[in-house]
Structures are given as structure tokens and as C-alpha cells.
Image (tube, helix red, strand yellow):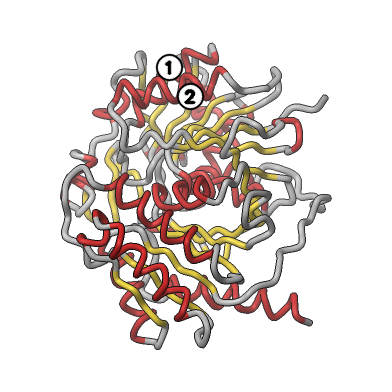
């Protein structure tokens, strides 16, 4: 009975897909496990989402511990602890629990994602040239210095950029030290070096964003995928934009400006069943004469503590629409929203196939009420104004290929 070569544990679904997609693109059968009923021997790469980013620190640690204990692995399996590229959630505590549960004494940490403007310099995280603690993410992440996140992991060390670029022998000596190694990286080449030397140093556990995940997947020999699943055909593309980030709002506005029908969910609809049901009927009716419909929370007033409720409401809306119309695909923005929609559709796993572009992942729902439906996922804070349009065009082109 074969065990997975790689196991990825992420704290939200879009982050899980971000990292898993790079392995899928290399031809490895890659599945995101959404329910415990899935057999872990059926894929070379398994991706778990603990949905722990919005939990308390103790709850997040418990969720990661439970996931780590459930893993069906062998001594050759390697692990990737996916963390948010802007350090939201509890990255240090989750890594510490994973190391303890798996009995692993070394970990290489680097949350850089240069393709999305995230770099690590002198042990500090920068977002498009600005220290993390001075960006819109500071409210949840706090500070820029990565040591403040990983100090619970003892011992630890920082590996500066000159050491990353200074030759393999020096880097191997550093990585052979026990504990957590926090490494600088400003380019994809830096991440490739960390992945290459990490492999030579026998690292079993890595921690970072999708940037490091890409570098690690590039070390895997490409192969032809054996279980290609044919997407199902359908009608309109349903876009559920569940993030209130400025990037997601710009992307929603861009779609509407290009003529995509839009429904902007209100705060009243979050708490009022009648208004929510009216939105479902309106969206379903809009699909009769439109190729795509956008459902966005980009204009919602921020109410602390309502994130999970908002994701749940969007999932109810999505399910209500999909019960009424034959959709041709889903675009899901925001990890909480993507996970809530998959749960509402009773989907136990998501087969990943690759990236439309960096941070924009596509796959197919394996089962549930929408089995075979192609899905694109995207983290809320990623992309430029055209990113959701790019996802829409990809799914429309996919539908055309199925018609040919």
C-alpha cells in the first residue's frame, strides 16, 4: 500500500491549493482532503486544510496536532507546513506542534513568495517593498520580524541572504543544526537554492508559502498524470468573492465594469434569511442570459468576528444557486469562503491540476452534489485588477474545449 511522497498541511483552503497546484503541475496526483472519508493511499501528494487561521492559538494548535496524528505516512514522506505569506494566523505555534507530533527536530522556514511581491530580507518580511508591519495586513500579522513568530520553536537561527547565496557547503552546515532555520529569500532562485540544499541536507519538514512550495515541487521528477478526470460541462460561471481585501474589491469592480452581472451582498443579507433567499433567486435568474455572475462581499462594512458567518452565508447562497442552475464552473476567493462552499456541496476532496497563473489554482470537485465541476481558487489578497477576469476566461475556454 503506497503512502504519499509529500504531505502539505495548510491553515486555509486557498493556501492549500496554492501549494498543492505546483506539485500537480509536475504530474503528481494531488488531492486536497476535505473530509476524513478519503483514502490517503490514492494520491502521491495529499493536502490538508486545518481551517485554523481564524481560530485561537490553542484551537489552532489542537487542529494541527489532530491533522498530524491522522497522517498515513512512512519514513520517506516529506512535509510542508503551509503558512500565509503575510503571516496571518498562528504560524509559529502550528509549526511547533507539527514538529513535536511528528517527532521531527529540524525545519526550514521561508515565507517568501517573490511572484506575489513577498520577500524576506534580514529576517524581516516585506510586501511589495513595504515592511509587513506597515501594510494593510499588519492588523492581523502585527510585526515584520519573523523571529517574533517562530521564537516558540527553540532553538532557532536566522540564515541571511549572503549565506543563502554563499554556496551549498555553508548552507548545509547551517541546516544540519537542530531547531528552526529562518532563511532570507528575495528571488525564485533563492528559494530554488533553499530547496536544493534542503534536499541534500536531508530536511524532512519545510515551512513557508506557495513560493517555497513551488521550489520544492521543481525538485520532483515530472511524470504523466494517470488519473485525468474529465470536467463536466455546464452553464454560467459562478464567482464567489468572499474577501474584503482591497485587491479582491478591485477585482470585483473590474468584472462589473466589464459587464459581468454582479450581486453585492449586504450586511443585512448576512443576518436576514429572506434577503439571502432573494439574492439566491436573483443570481439564479441572472444566469439565464449571462455567461457569468459575480457574488461579492467587497462592499461589506467590517464587523469584527463576523468572518465565519459571512463565509457560511456565501456558501448557502452558492449551494442555493447550484441547486437551481447547471453551472459551468466556480471561482472561489478567500480561504474561509472556499472551504465553506466545498462543505456545503458535500465535497470530500478536490483534485488539483495546476495554476492559471501564480496564486490562481484550478481543480475539480471529486464528489458531492457538484462532482466533476471545475473550480478556480484564489487567496483574497493576491493578484491585480484583472485576475478574476483571467480566471473567468480560463474556465470559459475550458468549457469550449469540452464542447469541441
Q: Position of residue 184 (x, y in %)?
A: 38, 39
Q: Is mark 2 on a helix, strand or loop?
A: strand
Give the answer, above or below, for where 64 lies relative to 116. above
Q: Do the residues labelled 2 and 1 touch (CB within 8 Å)?
A: yes
Image quadrant assignment for residue 325: bottom right
Q: How crowded is mark 2: few (under 14 residues within 10 Å), some or many (20 or more)?
A: many
Q: How crowded is mark 1: few (under 14 residues within 10 Å), some or many (20 or more)?
A: some
Residue at image point 42% right, 25% down: 95
Give the answer, above or below, for where 295 lies relative to 108. below
Residue assigned mark 2: 107
Query: Which is more toward the observer, 172 or 289?
Result: 289
Q: Position of residue 354 (x, y in %)?
A: 63, 57
Give the answer, above or below, for where 168 lies relative to 253. above
Q: Is mark 1 on a helix, strand or loop?
A: strand
Give the answer, above or below, for where 195 lies relative to 265. above
Residue assigned mark 1: 179
**Quick one: label 2 or label 1, which is nearer the N terminus?**
2
**Which image quarter is the N terminus in?**
top right
Does the rendering let one see residue 178? yes
Q: Position of residue 119 (x, y in %)?
A: 35, 49
Query: Which is more toward the observer, 226 or 279?
Result: 279
Q: Mark 2 to mark 1: distance in Å?
A: 6 Å
Image quadrant assignment for residue 94: top left
In the rendered structure, the answer to whether residue 389 lies left or right of residue 217 reads left
Does the rendering let one see residue 359? no
Query: Which is more toward the observer, 2 or 50?
Result: 50
Amino acid at each position: 500500500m503506497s503512502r504519499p511522497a509529500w504531505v502539505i498541511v495548510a491553515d486555509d483552503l486557498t493556501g492549500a491549493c496554492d501549494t498543492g497546484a505546483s506539485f500537480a503541475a509536475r504530474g503528481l496526483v494531488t488531492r486536497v482532503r476535505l473530509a476524513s472519508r478519503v483514502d490517503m493511499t490514492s494520491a502521491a501528494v495529499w493536502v490538508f486544510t486545518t481551517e485554523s487561521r481564524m481560530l485561537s492559538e490553542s484551537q489552532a494548535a489542537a487542529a494541527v496536532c489532530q491533522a498530524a496524528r491522522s497522517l498515513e505516512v512512512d519514513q520517506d514522506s516529506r512535509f510542508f507546513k503551509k503558512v500565509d505569506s503575510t503571516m496571518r494566523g498562528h504560524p509559529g505555534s502550528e509549526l511547533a506542534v507539527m514538529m513535536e507530533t511528528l517527532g521531527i527536530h529540524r525545519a526550514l522556514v521561508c515565507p517568501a513568495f517573490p511572484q506575489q511581491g513577498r520577500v524576506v530580507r534580514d529576517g524581516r518580511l516585506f510586501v511589495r517593498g513595504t515592511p509587513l508591519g506597515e501594510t494593510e495586513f499588519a492588523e492581523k500579522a502585527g510585526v515584520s520580524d519573523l523571529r517574533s513568530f517562530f521564537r516558540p520553536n527553540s532553538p532557532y537561527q536566522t540564515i541571511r541572504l549572503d549565506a543563502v547565496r554563499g554556496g551549498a557547503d555553508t548552507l548545509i552546515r547551517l541546516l544540519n543544526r537542530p531547531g528552526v532555520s529562518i532563511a532570507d529569500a528575495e528571488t525564485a532562485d533563492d528559494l530554488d537554492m533553499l530547496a536544493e540544499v534542503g534536499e541534500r541536507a536531508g530536511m524532512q519538514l519545510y515551512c513557508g508559502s506557495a513560493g517555497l512550495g513551488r521550489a520544492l515541487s521543481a525538485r520532483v521528477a515530472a511524470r504523466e498524470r494517470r488519473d485525468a478526470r474529465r470536467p463536466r460541462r455546464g452553464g454560467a460561471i459562478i464567482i464567489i468573492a468572499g474577501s474584503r481585501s482591497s485587491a479582491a474589491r478591485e477585482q470585483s469592480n473590474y468584472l462589473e465594469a466589464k459587464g459581468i452581472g454582479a450581486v453585492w451582498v449586504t450586511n443585512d443579507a448576512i443576518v436576514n434569511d429572506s434577503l439571502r433567499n432573494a439574492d439566491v433567486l436573483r443570481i439564479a435568474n441572472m444566469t439565464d442570459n449571462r455567461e457569468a455572475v459575480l457574488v461579492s462581499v467587497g462592499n461589506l462594512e467590517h464587523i469584527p468576528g463576523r468572518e465565519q458567518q459571512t463565509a457560511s452565508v456565501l456558501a448557502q447562497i452558492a449551494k442555493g444557486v447550484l441547486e437551481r442552475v447547471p453551472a459551468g464552473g466556480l471561482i472561489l476567493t478567500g480561504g474561509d469562503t472556499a472551504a465553506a462552499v466545498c462543505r456545503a456541496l458535500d465535497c470530500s476532496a478536490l483534485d488539483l491540476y495546476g495554476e492559471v497563473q501564480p496564486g490562481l489554482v484550478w481543480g475539480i470537485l471529486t464528489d458531492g452534489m457538484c462532482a466533476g465541476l471545475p473550480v478556480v481558487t484564489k487567496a483574497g489578497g493576491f493578484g491585480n485588477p484583472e485576475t478574476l477576469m483571467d480566471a473567468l476566461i480560463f474556465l470559459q475556454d475550458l468549457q469550449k474545449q469540452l464542447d469541441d
